[in-house]
Image: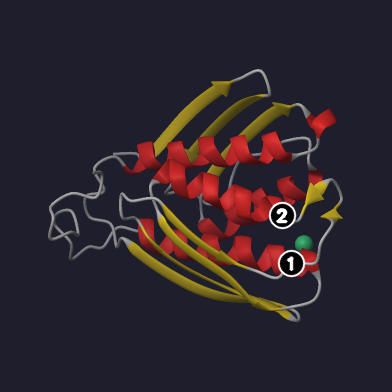
Amino acid sequence: MTRSARIERSTAETQVALAVDLDGTGEGSRTTGVGFFDHMLDLLARHGRLDLDVQVTGDLETGGHHTVEDTGIVLGQAIDRALADRRGIHRYGHAVVPMDEARASCTLDISGRPYVAFSAELPPGATGTFDHELTEEFFRAVANGAKLTLHIEVERGTNAHHMIEACFKAFARALRQAVAIDPTETGVPSTKGTLTA
Ligand SMILES: [Mn+2]
């Protein structure tokens, strides 16, 4: 059984084609037109051990907002679809990742109930064409699409590149734990009996 999904989404603002395999190694290519965001998606694939292909054509003349948000929406939907009935997963994941002076933590639950607690005092501005405030928009979109309870906190740091990179790496590591198959788990790890509703 492969835990993978491919989704294409087209609107007046963006065209997103995305494929994910939860049991990958970091293969694939990420091309969104926002270079720093491609760098972050590369980290997400590598540290999440996701095979991830992302091709986006967005209305970058308005900035990167639609491109980043819509990529997050589709990534979340693809994770949701790849997880199917959630049978046998660990469900929870947690990671604290340093990046030089910066440190971010992520704890998440593949709960079926979207919720985001994002806390970061990111320096205002942009890295390349990636506005720092898009970090929260991306994770909100992913959590909504994949129906995650997602807590991310930048615990310290001064360099925005490092702080945002620590967020993506912490999310990647936490997601990798949460989606991993628990060999002792024979069903869906919920007393409610479902993690999809
Ligand atoms: Mn970097």
Residue neighbourhood size for the residue with mark 2, other residues' Cα within 10 Å, grouped as few (<14), some (14–19), many (≥20): some
Q: Residue at x 56, y 32 (%)?
A: 18
Taking the image as shown, residue 156 lies to the left or right of residue 5, namely: right
Taking the image as shown, residue 3 lies to the left or right of residue 182, namely: right
Q: Amino acid at mark 2?
A: Glu
Name the one closer to the observer, 136 or 45: 136
**Up-down: is 147 above or below 122?**
above
Quadrant for the C terminus, please: top left
Q: Secondary structure at mark 2?
A: loop
**Up-down: is 113 above or below 78?**
below
Q: Which residue is mark 2?
A: 133
Ligand 1 within 8 Å of disc 1? The answer is: no
Q: CA distance from mark 2 to mark 1?
A: 8 Å
How are the colours assigned in the image?
secondary structure
**Residue 31 shows up from this direction:** no
Residue neighbourhood size for the residue with mark 1, other residues' Cα within 10 Å, grouped as few (<14), some (14–19), many (≥20): some
Ligand 1 image position (quadrant): bottom right
Image position, residue 164 (x, y; %):
70, 63
**Up-down: is 52 above or below 189?**
above
Q: Which residue is mark 1?
A: 122
Q: Are marks 2 and 1 in contact (CB under 8 Å)?
A: yes
Taking the image as shown, residue 40 lies to the left or right of residue 26, namely: right
Image position, residue 159 (x, y; %):
81, 72
Earlier-in-chain disc, 2 versus 1: 1
Quadrant for the N terminus, please: top left
**Up-down: is 194 above or below 14?**
below
Image position, residue 2 (x, y; %):
34, 39
Q: Residue at x 26, y 48 (%)?
A: 86
Q: Secondary structure at mark 1?
A: loop
Q: Amino acid at mark 1?
A: Leu
Q: Residue at x 80, y 67 (%)?
A: 123
